[in-house]
Image (cartoon, rainbow, N blue to C red):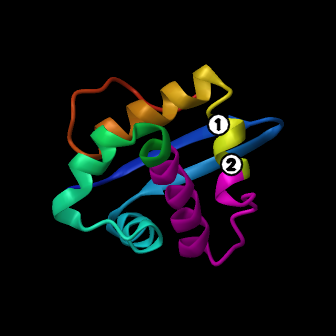
Amino acid sequence: MENIRGEFSFSLGKKKYQASLTLNALRLMCNAFNVKLDSLDKWLNDDPLTAVPAFAYYGVKNKAARAGKDSGLPDFEQFCAQALDDAETLQTMMQAVTAALGGDSEETGN
């Protein structure tokens, strides 16, 4: 897990977000969803419609925290409602998560 790293951007509606998937983003997400590192792959495979947006959501929160700014994100349920309704955004998120976790992926972002 020490190599997790991914920078990407995506749009929800008219707003563009920047995300940074690092160990801190992973920590934030795991704490919020009570997921242990050793069960991360299982969670991602068992519930990708929650896990993939969660990676993106906490990637945005992490990027904002590193800059000392507010993320400007809606709550997680509203975020999912918007992200899961947009195939392009969901694809961007899936590619970024795959790449950050060391999977096979091409360029991420839009």
- The stretch drawn in magenta includes residue 67: yes
Which residue is rendered at x = 28% and y = 39% of the image?
45
Which stretch is magenta?
53-77
Q: Say above or below: 63 vs 6.
A: below
User: Counting other residues with Cα less than 10 Å from the Cα at mark 2, is it few (<14), some (14-19), or many (20 or more)?
Assistant: some
The image position of residue 94, as x and y in percent, is 42, 33
Question: Farthest residue toward the bottom?
Answer: 68
Number of labels in the image equals 2
Q: Amino acid at mark 1?
A: Ala
From the viewer's side, name the closer residue of 55 and 84.
Answer: 84
Amino acid carrying label 2: it is Phe
- In the rendered image, the quadrant that contains the N terminus is bottom left
What's the magenta bit mostly, secondary-structure-wise?
helix
x 22%, y 48%: residue? 41
Residue 2 visible here: no
Mark 1 to mark 2: distance in Å?
6 Å
Q: Closer to the camera, 106 or 74?
A: 74
Mark 1 Cα within 10 Å, few/some/many (few <14, many 20+)? many
Q: Quadrant of residue 34?
A: bottom left
Considering the image in quadrants, where does the C terminus appear?
Answer: top right
Q: Where is 78 relative to 58, above or below?
A: above
Residue 97 picture location, percent across and down: 37, 41
33 relative position to 42: left or right: right
Do the numbered discs 1 and 2 sit on residues whose CB atoms are within 8 Å? yes
Give coordinates of residue 47: x percent, y percent. 39, 42
Tag shown at residue 83: 1
Q: Is residue 41 left or right of residue 88?
A: left
Q: Position of residue 6 (x, y in %)?
A: 38, 48
> Which structural element holds mark 1?
helix
Q: Report the disc number at residue 79.
A: 2
Determine whether, in the image, residue 42 is placed left or right of residue 107. left
Q: Relative to 95, is 27 above or below?
A: below
